[in-house]
Image (spheres, rainbow, N blue to C red):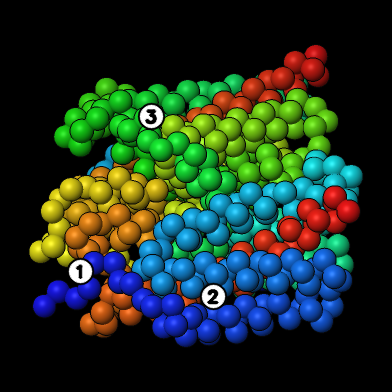
C-alpha cells in the first residue's frame, strides 16, 4: 500500500503541538540576546525566532515545505549582506579591505573557504586564510566556529546545507522568484558539471599557490560583502570579476531561468557538500508506480538536480539539496521524503528532517536574521 | 653519516635527490594542476595513462636537462630573477594557457559521448603526445622556488655536464610524487569526470593566460 499519496494537512492544534519543540529550541537561540543584548537585540531576536517558528508551524499545518523555506531563505539572503555591510562600514568605514587588515587576520571566515584549505593544511599544516583560528574581539567569525558549525550541519543534513544553512543562496532564490515564468528554458546540461570544475580548479590552484584562490578571484558574493581595496590593476580586475559574476550568476540568470544558477553551475562549495550527500539519512525518492512522468518535479527543482533520467531512476542526483520543491510540485504524491534504512512513512521522514534542518536554520540563519535586523534598526535610529 | 649543517661547496647527487624529493609535493601541486585534468580527460587505462605520464615526464626531463645545460654554460642565475626570468616565465605560461585552452575547446566542442571519445582519440593521434611532451617541457622550465634553488646549487657544480646530472637526479626526486597520477585515467568509465576535467582545463587556461600576461607586463615595466 502506498503511503501518503497527497500532501498531508494537519489541524492547527496538532501542528502547534508538533511545533512546540522548535519553539523551545528557538527560545534557547534567543538566550544570548536576552542575557547580554540591548533592547534592539532582544526585540530582533524575538522577531526572528517568532518568524522561524511561525514558518515551521505553517510547514506542518499545510504539508508544504518549499514555499515557507523559501520565505526564510530569501529573507536570510537579503538581510545577511545588508547587516554584514553595515557592520563592515561601522567597523572599518568601507566594504573594501586594506591589505594590512588582511594580513592582520581580521577577515571573517566563510564556509566557502573550507575546501581550499584542506590540501595545503594536510601538506604543510598551513592555514591559507588570513583569519583567526579562535574568535576574538572584532572578529567573532573565526575558523574554528565556522568549521564546527559546518561539520555538525554536514553530518546531519549533508547537502541540505545549501537549502537551510547557506546565507548566500537566498539572494538568487529571491531573484529567481520575481518572474512567474522562465524566459530561458533550455539549459545545456554540461554546465551542471561547472561546480565540480570550479571546485577542482580552486583546490588545485590553492594547493599550488598556497592562497585562497576562490576568495581572491572567483567569489560572486564578494560584491555584496567585502573585497580587497582597489589600489591597482590587479585589485581592479578582481573587483570587476566579482561584480560581473554576481550580476550574471546571482541576478540576471536566476531572473531569466527561475533557477539558482550560481548554485547549479558555479558554486564549488555546493559540489563539496555533494561529496557528503550520502552521510545524511534524509533522501528524496520518486515512486514510479504513482508517477505520471509529467515532469513537474524536474521543472520545480531550482538546481537542476532532477531530470528525466532521475525520474526514471526514482531519485534525484546527489546534488539534491532537499529543499522540498519537487515534493510540493508533484500532483500525485509520487515524490516523497525518505529516511534511509527505514520504512518510515514519508511524512514522518519529512518531520524528522524538518526538525533537524529547521533546527539548524534557527541556530544559524535565525541568529543572522536577528543580528542583521538589529544592525538595520540601529542604522536608522 | 651526519649531514653537514651548511651546503657543501660542490653539490653532490644525493643532495639533488633529497632536494627533489623534498620539493616534490610542491611539484605535484603545481604540475598536478595541469596533469590531473589532462590525463583524466584522456580516459585511458592505468597502463595507457602511465604511458602518457611517461611522455609528460620525458618532456619535463628534457626541460630540466636543457635548463641544467644552460645553467652550467651561462651561470647567470641572478638574471633569471630579473627581466629575462620574467620574460621566460611569461612566455611559457602563455604557451601553457594556449595548450590547455585548445585541449579544453576541442573536448567541449564534441557534444555526445561517442564523438567526445573519438575527438579525444583524434586529438591524441594528431598532437596529443607531442602536446603532452611540450607541456612537460614548459612546466620543466617554470621558475618555482625549489627549481631556482636547485639551479643555484647546480650552478656551483662545475660545468654543464655536472649541472645536467644534478638536474637529472633532481628530476627523479620530484617525479616520485607524480606516480599516483597513473590512476587518473582509470576513472574514464565515468563520462562526467571527463567533462569536468575539460572545464577545469578551460579555467586553468584563463589562469595561466592571466599569470603569463602579468609576468610580461612586469617585464615591460622593468624595461
- Check the image and report above or below for A51 versus A112: below
Chain letter behind tag 1: A
Q: Earlier along the polypeptide chain: callout 1 or callout 2? A: 1
Q: Find residue A5 and name its label.
A: 1
Q: Does the image show residue A38?
A: yes
| Foreground of the two, A354 or A109 | A354
Percent x, y of residue B72: 65, 32
Label 1 – label 3 distance at C-alpha:
32 Å
Instruction: Check disc 3 and report its element: helix, strand or loop.
Output: loop
Instruction: Check disc 2 and report its element: helix, strand or loop.
Output: helix
Identify the residue position indicated by label 2 in the image: A359
Q: Earlier along the polypeptide chain: callout 1 or callout 3? A: 1
Q: Residue at x 31, y 75 (%)?
A: A347
Chain letter behind tag 2: A
Q: Residue A378 appears in which quarter of the rendering?
A: bottom right
Q: Residue at x 56, y 73 (%)?
A: A53
Q: Which mark's residue is nearer the viewer, 1 or 3? A: 1
Both on one chain, marks 1 and 2? yes
Q: Residues within 10 Å of mark 2 (few under 14, many from 20)?
A: many
Label 3 – label 2 distance at C-alpha:
36 Å
Percent x, y of residue B50: 31, 47
Percent x, y of residue B23: 61, 53
Q: Which mark's residue is nearer the viewer, 1 or 2? A: 1
Identify the residue position indicated by label 3 in the image: A183
- Check the image and report above or below for A305 versus A249: below
Both on one chain, marks 1 and 3? yes
Percent x, y of residue B108: 33, 30
Amino acid at each position: 500500500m502506498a503511503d501518503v499519496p497527497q500532501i498531508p494537512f494537519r489541524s492547527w492544534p496538532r501542528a502547534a503541538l508538533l511545533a512546540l519543540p522548535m519553539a523551545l529550541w528557538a527560545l534557547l537561540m534567543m538566550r544570548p540576546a536576552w542575557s547580554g543584548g540591548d533592547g534592539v537585540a532582544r526585540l530582533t531576536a524575538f522577531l526572528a525566532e517568532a518568524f522561524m517558528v511561525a514558518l515551521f508551524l505553517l510547514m506542518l499545518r499545510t504539508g508544504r515545505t518549499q514555499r515557507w523555506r523559501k520565505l526564510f531563505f530569501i529573507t536570510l539572503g537579503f538581510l545577511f549582506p545588508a547587516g554584514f555591510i553595515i557592520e563592515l562600514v561601522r567597523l572599518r568605514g568601507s566594504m573594501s579591505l586594506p591589505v594590512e587588515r588582511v594580513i592582520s587576520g581580521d577577515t571573517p571566515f566563510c564556509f566557502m573557504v573550507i575546501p581550499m584549505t584542506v590540501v595545503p593544511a594536510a601538506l604543510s599544516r598551513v592555514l591559507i586564510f588570513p583569519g583567526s583560528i579562535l574568535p576574538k574581539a572584532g572578529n567573532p567569525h573565526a575558523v574554528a566556529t565556522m568549521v564546527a558549525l559546518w561539520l555538525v550541519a554536514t553530518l546531519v543534513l549533508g547537502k541540505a546545507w545549501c537549502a537551510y544553512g547557506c546565507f548566500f543562496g537566498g539572494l538568487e532564490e529571491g531573484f529567481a522568484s520575481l518572474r512567474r515564468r522562465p524566459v530561458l528554458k533550455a539549459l545545456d546540461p554540461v554546465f551542471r558539471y561547472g561546480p565540480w570544475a570550479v571546485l577542482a580548479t580552486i583546490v588545485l590552484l590553492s594547493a599550488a599557490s598556497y592562497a585562497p584562490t576562490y576568495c581572491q578571484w572567483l567569489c560572486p558574493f564578494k560584491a555584496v560583502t567585502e573585497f580587497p581595496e582597489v589600489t591597482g590593476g590587479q585589485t581592479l580586475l578582481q573587483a570587476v570579476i566579482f561584480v560581473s559574476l554576481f550580476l550574471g550568476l546571482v541576478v540576471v540568470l536566476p531572473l531569466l531561468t527561475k533557477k539558482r544558477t550560481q548554485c547549479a553551475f558555479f558554486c564549488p562549495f555546493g559540489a563539496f557538500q555533494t561529496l557528503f550527500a550520502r552521510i545524511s539519512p534524509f533522501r528524496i525518492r520518486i515512486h514510479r508506480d504513482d508517477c505520471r512522468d509529467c515532469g513537474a518535479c524536474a521543472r520545480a527543482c531550482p538546481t537542476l538536480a532532477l531530470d528525466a533520467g532521475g525520474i526514471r531512476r526514482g531519485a534525484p542526483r546527489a546534488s539534491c539539496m532537499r529543499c522540498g520543491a519537487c515534493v510540493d510540485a508533484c500532483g500525485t504524491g509520487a515524490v516523497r521524503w525518505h529516511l534511509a534504512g527505514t520504512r518510515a512513512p514519508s511524512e514522518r521522514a519529512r518531520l524528522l528532517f524538518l526538525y533537524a534542518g529547521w533546527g539548524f536554520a534557527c541556530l544559524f540563519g535565525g541568529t543572522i536574521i536577528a543580528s542583521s535586523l538589529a544592525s538595520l534598526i540601529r542604522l536608522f535610529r | 653519516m651526519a649531514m653537514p649543517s651548511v651546503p657543501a661547496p660542490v653539490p653532490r647527487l644525493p643532495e639533488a635527490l633529497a632536494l627533489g624529493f623534498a620539493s616534490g609535493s610542491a611539484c605535484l601541486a603545481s604540475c598536478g594542476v595541469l596533469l590531473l585534468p589532462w590525463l583524466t580527460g584522456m580516459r585511458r587505462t592505468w597502463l595507457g595513462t602511465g604511458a602518457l605520464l611517461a611522455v609528460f615526464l620525458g618532456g619535463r626531463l628534457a626541460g630540466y636537462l636543457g635548463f641544467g645545460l644552460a645553467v652550467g654554460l651561462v651561470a647567470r642565475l641572478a638574471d633569471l630573477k630579473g627581466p629575462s626570468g620574467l620574460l621566460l616565465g611569461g612566455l611559457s605560461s602563455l604557451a601553457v594557457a594556449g595548450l590547455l585552452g585548445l585541449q579544453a575547446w576541442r573536448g567541449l566542442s564534441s557534444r555526445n559521448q561517442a564523438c567526445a571519445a573519438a575527438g579525444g582519440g583524434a586529438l591524441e593521434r594528431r598532437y596529443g603526445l607531442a602536446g603532452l611532451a611540450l607541456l612537460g617541457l614548459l612546466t620543466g622550465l617554470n621558475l618555482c622556488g625549489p627549481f631556482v634553488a636547485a639551479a643555484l646549487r647546480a650552478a656551483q657544480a662545475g660545468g654543464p655536464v655536472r649541472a645536467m646530472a644534478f638536474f637529472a637526479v633532481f628530476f627523479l626526486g620530484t617525479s616520485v610524487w607524480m606516480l599516483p597520477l597513473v590512476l587518473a585515467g582509470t576513472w574514464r568509465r565515468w563520462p562526467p569526470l571527463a567533462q569536468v576535467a575539460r572545464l577545469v582545463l578551460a579555467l586553468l587556461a584563463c589562469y595561466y593566460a592571466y599569470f603569463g600576461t602579468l609576468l610580461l607586463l612586469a617585464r615591460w615595466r622593468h624595461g
